[in-house]
């Protein structure tokens, strides 16, 4: 284990972050019993309150199990953790992006987006359609100026309205997690997503389909729209994979096999 002494003794989030890295990078394998609290406190340089708070958060995240009066054991996060962990595994040690995690994000986005649009078209009221069309109208100056960062922000606003209109709490929570994660890398992705962001006609078509309660059209157009970004991103990932030397890591954090 590559644990480091904590400089600020009361920051349980720093303990949490270190232990998350150890677990998702595989240095703390599933089934491993963590050292006793006293040993961990000495290693990290924190008090028991900070350590226990970090362990509680790890248990809530599905990364460890805490036995009453017994040991704390590492869980296989691929089987027990939720989507909230995605932001933790997006970056490898050293700050590089895990391309396999990005691929997974694009795939789940491609699967969810059409159904979000379909449900929104079935369930949304007239007021929500007005919101969608307002976002589309606000896109027009950015489209004329080819202002991709502005279009990126407006696209996220558009999908935020759509997911609210879907009236599906699971989709809402998944979208919140995906958006938070996307925000950490959005500047790096803006050019890759350019074709999707520039397709103003598709955004308008989705909004109009929602207004007609035409769920088939909304789903079809949304699927084609997000495929722009998915296709470009997967092309980039394949290119970067070919350019990246084989490190011999057969089981990276993003590998869900």
Image: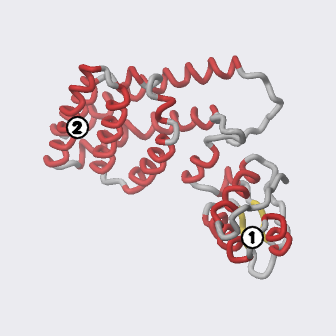
* Residue 153 location (% of width, % of height): 35, 37
Q: Is residue 144 above or below residue 46?
A: above
The label on residue 144 is: none
Circle 2 packing at 10 Å, graded few (<14), some (14-19), many (20+), is many
Residue located farthest toward the bottom when viewing the structure as drawn: 69
Q: CA distance from mark 1 to mark 2?
A: 48 Å
* Residue 243 location (% of width, % of height): 70, 18
Residue position for label 1: 46
In this rendering, position of residue 172 left or right of residue 3? left
Is residue 81 visible from the viewing direction of this image?
A: yes
Kindly identify the residue that appears in the image at 63 percent across and 62 percent down.
13
Q: Earlier in the sequence, mark 1 or mark 2?
A: 1
* Residue 15 location (% of width, % of height): 70, 62
Residue position for label 2: 135
171 or 36, which lies in front?
36
Residue located farthest toward the front when viewing the structure as drawn: 7
Give the quarter of the image for residue 223: top left
Q: Quadrant of the N terminus?
A: bottom right
Q: Secondary structure at mark 1?
A: loop
Kindly identify the residue that appears in the image at 69 percent across and 17 percent down.
242
Q: Secondary structure at mark 2?
A: helix
In this rendering, position of residue 92 left or right of residue 212? right
* Residue 122 location (% of width, % of height): 24, 45
């Amino acid at each position: 284990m590559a644990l480091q002494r904590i400089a600020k003794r009361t920051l349980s989030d720093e303990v949490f972050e270190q232990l998350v890295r150890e677990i998702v990078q595989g240095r703390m394998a599933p089934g491993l019993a963590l050292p006793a609290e006293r040993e961990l406190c000495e290693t990290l340089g924190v008090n028991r309150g900070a350590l226990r708070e970090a362990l509680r958060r790890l248990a809530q995240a599905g990364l460890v199990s805490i036995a009453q009066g017994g040991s704390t054991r590492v869980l296989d996060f691929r089987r027990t953790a939720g989507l909230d962990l995605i932001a933790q595994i997006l970056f490898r040690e050293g700050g590089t992006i895990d391309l396999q995690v990005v691929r997974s994000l694009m795939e789940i986005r491609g699967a969810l987006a059409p159904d979000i649009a379909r449900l929104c078209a079935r369930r949304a009221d007239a007021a929500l359609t007005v919101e969608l069309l307002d976002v589309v109208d606000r896109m027009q100056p950015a489209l004329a100026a080819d202002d991709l960062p502005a279009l990126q922000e407006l696209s996220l606003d558009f999908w935020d309205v759509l997911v609210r209109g879907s009236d599906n709490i699971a989709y809402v929570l998944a979208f919140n997690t995906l958006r938070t994660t996307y925000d950490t890398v959005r500047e790096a992705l803006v050019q890759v997503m350019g074709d999707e962001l520039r397709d103003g006609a598709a955004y308008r078509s989705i909004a109009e389909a929602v207004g007609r309660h035409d769920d088939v059209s909304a789903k079809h157009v949304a699927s084609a729209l997000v495929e722009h970004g998915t296709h470009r991103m997967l092309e980039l990932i394949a290119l970067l994979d070919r350019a990246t030397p084989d490190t011999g890591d057969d089981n990276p954090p993003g590998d869900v096999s």
